[in-house]
Image (cartoon, rainbow, N blue to C red):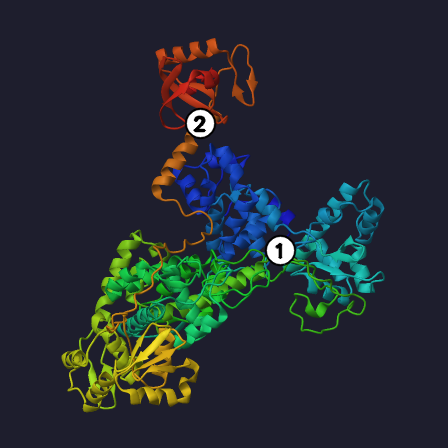
């Protein structure tokens, strides 16, 4: 059954509204018929319509039909809802519900399960499109918003996502009457007197199942093969000047129509007949199920996630501590150089991509920024010190909260922008507005599985593609001209390289480039989803691929079972959710210990995370040798000298180790400390350019004789003094490299204690996310906006009494000053409402319905129904006034 027959046999399906009320003639009328809840649902689904709040429903309808708004709404539909919109774009306008259902069910009954799924999903999809004002009208006259129809309807440059081409009427527009009559005659139809009736006759033939079947029964098998290759689109193909007989047979009977001297198209009516009336090859009414990769006990998942969360905190702390005295320089164009990123990755012992993630995480959380100096460098911010003072669980919650809201995308680091420039870590152009939404969707889908269950990544990506398909990629058809001339690559399931009846004389034209590139957008969403899975594991949001209990609390999801769609964003404030997540994580984290285990090989083992004062002191006295569940520290002469440089004595170090070691201080370690302390400060370095002072002139002679000291350009000034042409810092570093333990001294001869002050940036705020459109309005804003729109619509549509001498300009009433004053005074006495035209101080004109209560001093005060409040208006700014009709007064 074709579209024409469906239209004639349209009926209201069982269980659907009868649509007995008069169908609205415009979208504004349809919106006017909605209740306040319906308007609030529209504004919640499409918040861009609120910027600014429309004056009335007519303006709201106009804004809802703008191209930018419609594109945004289409891109936020799920796959089946988008398929429904695509089907309406190729259906008659308006289309009965039965016609729409026929475009999914077709002439042949679908399998029972598929038919039931479509029957259940189609009403929901239509209701969703109605709610978002993309479709309006009753079930007997469904209308797709004109802008959406223009975007989704087929054209030679941009074929329909359904793979259908233009109608016979559209494809024959501009064709000569003589050529039309030739097609009519070749199709076996009686000749007509004008092109309109000829097109109507062809359309009737192609939509008549029985007659169309008879016509195709006479077609050569090669011609049917050509149709099979074009039926699911793209419907366009190129031919040579002398096509083969099968192609000529199709062209002569209008089964292929020319759109240019070298391009043919399969008319929509013919394609629908060959498809059995279906607009889509594979309707997808049901979202793909999430596959399960593996299931664990929730306790195992929480333990693994907690361990990784603690590792994440340690990594961020280690990164920022290494930049405590000033980090790498900022590139002129912004960001971190490739060399510095490699150094950071080597210091953290992670791949460069992971290092970029930690850098961007610290930057997004406001812990890292540039210092803004002339020689600009990266450094921790003052917020980093506050973050260090927080308990570990709260520090984790802060990092994850920042990650969830961030639009910066570390996975792009190393790639190129549109101009071919390499994207650098901490640099510009890393923001992707879709990132927060993808993160929440991925984690929300993981939460729909039972606790402890890890999802199969590929099934999760398939679900995301169904929930947010990119416009133009929801079906097999792709924008561009079909390779009809190369049937082996046509979208009909043929094997590559298969020969066709016209392959030898035709070729496939280059695909047309769509105005928006849906494929890269789809790829970006998929890449974002893959990055989210890896990032969530690094942060301890997931453990072994499953969502942890603290992460569920942070996302406002139920803790003891799968989350449904309504559970996402359960109404808890983010701060409260973060506190709850920190409370759940705290008992899972390892407790900090206040001791180490000293070993005879000059190492110390920390059996767990150390208390911060102990960790800071031990980091000065020893070098970290390995990390993990137990951190291993190694004592070296250089590390002991580093501790002595901070002003500690050998006795202080012995006391420190005795107090914090559960084992006795090994003799080799005690000897190392005493030996380094005995040599420490024996040489003194001061400022001349620089000098070396020592009571042992033999030691100075040894230094002078050492070839390694040549670069310091030393010479003896006195038996106990050497002068150098290097600065004190370089001289200190050079002698330490030679194995000595010199100490710096002041001009008075006192030993200088070197405690380097931590370098901090001025107070910095975390980078603001780049939003993907306006935020979803809250209930208070929605209520106020609906009230304002209703009031403005009442003012715009109120029935007014015609004045004795009606004079209007620009839709506003025009009355004399005396008439205006008399009318508002009379309304104040009678308590009635009037309609006024008003021009504010900025020159903006508006119309309002007010109920005057006082008129004095050149001002009228009254209740403004439009603004829903009492206001005062200067009389000289009122352009005119008109009384309302009795029923509206």
Q: Secondary structure at mark 1?
A: loop
Task: Look at mark 2 in the image and give the residue it sits on.
Answer: 794
Residue 47: image location, x then y, percent: 44, 45
Pick the front one: 223 or 136: 136
Q: Which residue appears farthest toward the front when viewing the image? A: 718
Residue 567 at x, y percent in the picture = 33, 56
Q: Nearer the viewer, residue 793 or 283?
A: 793
Tell me: 87 left or right of 536.
Answer: right
- Kindly identify which residue carries mark 1: 277
Asked whether disc 1 touches disc 2, contact meaning CB atoms under 8 Å apart, the reply is: no
Question: Residue 718 appears in which quarter of the rendering?
Answer: bottom left
Q: CA distance from mark 1 to mark 2?
A: 45 Å
Q: Quadrant of the C terminus?
A: top left
Q: Position of residue 314 (x, y in %)?
A: 31, 71
What percent of the width, then of the height, locates residue 593? Answer: 19, 75
Q: Is residue 406 left or right of residue 299?
A: right
């Amino acid at each position: 059954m074709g579209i024409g027959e469906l239209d004639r046999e349209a009926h209201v399906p069982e269980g659907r509204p009868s649509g007995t009320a008069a169908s609205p003639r415009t979208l504004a009328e349809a919106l006017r018929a909605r209740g306040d809840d319906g308007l609030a649902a529209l504004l919640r689904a499409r918040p861009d319509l609120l910027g600014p709040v429309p004056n009335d429903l007519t303006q709201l309808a106009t804004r809802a039909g703008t191209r930018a708004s419609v594109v945004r709404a289409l891109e936020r539909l799920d796959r089946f809802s988008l398929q429904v919109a695509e089907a309406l774009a190729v259906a008659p306008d308006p289309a009965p519900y039965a016609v729409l259902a026929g475009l999914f069910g077709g002439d042949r009954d679908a399998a029972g399960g598929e038919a039931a799924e479509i029957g259940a999903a189609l009403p929901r999809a239509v209701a969703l499109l109605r709610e978002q004002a993309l479709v309006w009208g009753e079930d007997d006259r469904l209308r797709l918003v004109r802008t959406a129809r223009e975007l989704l309807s087929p054209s030679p440059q941009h074929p329909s996502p359904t793979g259908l081409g233009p109608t016979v009427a559209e494809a024959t527009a501009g064709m000569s009457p003589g050529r039309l009559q030739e097609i009519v005659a070749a199709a076996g139809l009686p000749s007509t007197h004008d092109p309109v009736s000829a097109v109507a006759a062809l359309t009737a033939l192609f939509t008549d199942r029985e007659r169309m079947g008879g016509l195709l029964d006479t077609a050569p098998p090669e011609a049917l093969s050509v149709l099979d290759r074009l039926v699911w689109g793209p419907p366009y193909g190129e031919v040579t000047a002398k096509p083969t007989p099968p192609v000529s047979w199709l062209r002569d009977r209008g089964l292929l129509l020319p759109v240019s001297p070298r391009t043919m198209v399969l008319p929509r009516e013919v394609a629908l007949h060959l498809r059995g009336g279906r607009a889509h090859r594979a309707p997808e009414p049901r979202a793909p199920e999430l596959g399960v990769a593996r299931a664990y006990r929730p306790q195992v998942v929480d333990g693994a996630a907690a361990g990784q969360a603690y590792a994440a905190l340690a990594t961020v702390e280690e990164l920022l501590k290494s930049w405590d005295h000033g980090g790498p320089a900022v590139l002129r164009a912004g960001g971190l150089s490739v060399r510095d990123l490699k150094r950071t990755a080597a210091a953290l012992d992670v791949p460069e991509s992971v290092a970029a993630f930690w850098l961007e995480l610290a930057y997004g959380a406001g812990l890292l920024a540039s210092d803004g100096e002339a020689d600009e460098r990266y450094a921790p911010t003052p917020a980093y010190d506050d973050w260090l003072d927080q308990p570990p669980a709260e520090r984790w919650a802060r990092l994850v909260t920042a990650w969830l809201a961030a639009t910066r995308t570390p996975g792009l680091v190393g790639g190129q922008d549109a101009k071919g420039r390499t994207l650098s870590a901490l640099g510009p152009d890393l923001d992707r507005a879709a990132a927060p939404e993808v993160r929440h969707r991925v984690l929300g889908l993981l939460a729909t599985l039972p606790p402890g269950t890890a999802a199969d990544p590929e099934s999760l990506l398939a679900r995301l593609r169904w929930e947010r398909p990119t416009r133009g990629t929801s079906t097999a058809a792709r924008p561009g001209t079909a390779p009809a001339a190369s049937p082996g690559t046509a979208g009909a399931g043929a094997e590559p390289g298969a020969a066709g009846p016209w392959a030898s004389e035709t070729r496939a034209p280059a695909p047309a480039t769509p105005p928006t590139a849906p494929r890269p957008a789809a790829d970006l969403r998929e890449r974002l989803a893959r990055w989210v899975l890896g990032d969530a594991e690094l942060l301890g949001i997931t453990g072994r691929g499953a969502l942890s209990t603290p992460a569920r609390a942070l996302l406002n999801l139920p803790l003891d079972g799968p989350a449904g769609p309504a559970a996402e964003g359960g109404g808890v404030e983010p701060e409260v959710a973060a506190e709850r997540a920190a409370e759940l994580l705290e008992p899972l984290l390892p407790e900090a210990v206040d001791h180490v285990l000293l070993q005879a090989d000059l190492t110390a083992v920390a059996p767990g995370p150390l208390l911060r004062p102990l960790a800071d002191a031990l980091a000065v006295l020893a070098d970290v040798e390995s990390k993990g569940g137990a951190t291993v520290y190694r004592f070296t002469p250089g590390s002991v000298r580093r501790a002595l440089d901070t002003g500690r004595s050998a006795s202080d170090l012995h006391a420190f180790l005795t107090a914090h070691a559960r084992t006795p201080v090994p003799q080799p370690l005690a000897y190392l400390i005493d030996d380094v302390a005995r040599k420490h400060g024996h040489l003194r370095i001061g400022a001349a350019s620089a000098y070396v002072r020592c009571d042992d002139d033999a030691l100075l002679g040894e230094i002078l004789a050492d070839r390694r000291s040549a670069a310091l350009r030393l010479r003896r000034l006195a038996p106990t003094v050497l002068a150098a042409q290097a600065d004190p810092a370089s001289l200190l570093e050079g002698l330490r490299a030679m194995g000595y333990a010199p100490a710096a001294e002041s001009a008075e001869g006192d030993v200088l204690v070197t405690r380097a002050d931590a370098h901090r940036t001025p107070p910095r705020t975390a980078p603001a996310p780049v939003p993907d459109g306006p935020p979803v309005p809250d209930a208070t804003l929605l209520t106020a906006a609906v009230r304002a729109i209703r009031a403005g619509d009442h003012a715009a549509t109120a029935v007014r009494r015609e004045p004795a001498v009606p004079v209007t300009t620009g839709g506003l009433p025009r009355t004399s000053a005396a008439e205006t004053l008399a009318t508002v005074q009379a309304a104040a006495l009678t308590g009635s409402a009037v309609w006024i035209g008003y021009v504010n101080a900025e020159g903006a004109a508006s119309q309002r319905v007010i109920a005057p209560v006082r008129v004095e001093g050149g001002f009228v005060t009254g209740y403004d129904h439009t603004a829903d409040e009492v206001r005062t208006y200067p009389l000289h700014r009122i352009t005119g006034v008109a009384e309302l009709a009795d029923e509206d007064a």
